[in-house]
Amino acid sequence: MKEPLVSFGTDGLRGRVPEELDFADAIAFGYTIATKWQTGTVIGFDSRQSSPQLAEGIRLGFLAAQKKAPASCLWLGVAPTPAVAHLAKSRGSTGVVVTASHNPHPDNGLKVFDPTGLKPSQAVEDELSRIITKAHTSGLVEAAMPDGSLLDGDDMLAILTSSYLQAKKLVDKRVVITPMANLGLRLKLKDWGVAMVEVPVGDRNVQHKLLQGGWVLGGEQSGHIIMPQHAHTGDGLLTALHVLDVIWRNQEIWPVFEKVPQILINLETNLEPQEIAQRMSPEMELWQQEDNYEMRVLVRASGTERVLRIMVEAQSQDLLDDISKELVALAQSLDK
């Protein structure tokens, strides 16, 4: 395990990513900025490949430091350093830039401007280094890293379903899903008394079924969430705003359910994937059982790539591994 980067150089914290500077360092840096100045912040970054992830770490650390209502966090995206400094001063906020300036591409750095738009003095940098060290040793960085976990379509569908149920807005208590929906989500919806209307994979199918039934919520694990009362297509920004609004009002809502271990295997075949899937159909009927909450399998030809998709879910990792190997072996034996 690498040592945390805590010492400021000529201009901010700098190092090679991820050997010297990594996501954990960025979280600690964001926490430190919020702790020291207790104002809003402005975050910008350059176009290096590692910059967006480090900027996200800073944002997570900044939000993790908030004791009450979170202070404003303005995300600029790719922006020049002087713009961040100017906005910091004009808003009375700190400014953080992820950039290593003229250093080689594998390097990156974290720069900060105080609320007056100036870079900190040596004395302030020494203080910041002490706070960064404390953040690394207090367990805060580790705690902030789940909060940076990605929400897939199943997570978002569960969050929105919970909100719709509480507001009594879930028409007919029905949600449209696809075969890819995690078994954990299915169990949670069943517990809530929500009927699941399953359609083939593809947001087009979700859309058509929602409009046909007059229902208000459906989606795919891949992230397509459709709320026809707001938009007839999946809209990432619209979905994000609705999910964030729910989480903002109830920060204990997520995680809503425990995911059942799932594996998705993309298998290249000599024959057409659809032909292999058809040859496997008789075997699949033996695997698929109604209301089987121990395991679930799905074999289908991809609609976007020339591969056979094998999805397996099982309550235990050993069972998951065994079934996956058996299905791959079966597919390969039929690929002749």
Image: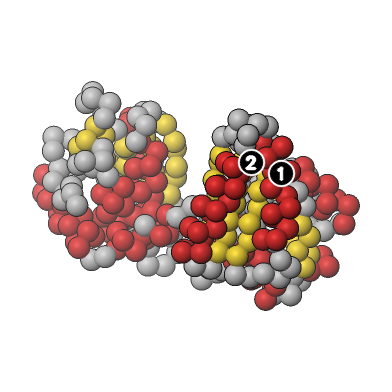
The answer to whether residue 121 of the structure is visible from this angle is no
Report the residue at 69% width, 55% height from top.
284
Label 1 sits on what residue type? Arg
Tag 1 and tag 2, C-beta contact below 8 Å: yes
The answer to whether residue 197 of the structure is visible from this angle is yes
Q: At which x and y percent is residue 331?
A: 60, 44
Q: Is residue 172 left or right of residue 89?
A: right
Locate the C terminus by quadrant: top right
Q: At which x and y percent is residue 179?
A: 69, 54
Q: Is residue 323 left or right of residue 238?
A: left
Q: Is residue 285 left or right of residue 318?
A: right
What is the number of the mark on residue 279?
1
In the image, residue 70 above or below residue 274: below
* Front residue of this view, candidates 314 and 95: 314
What is the number of the mark on residue 330?
none
Q: At which x and y percent is residue 196?
A: 75, 64
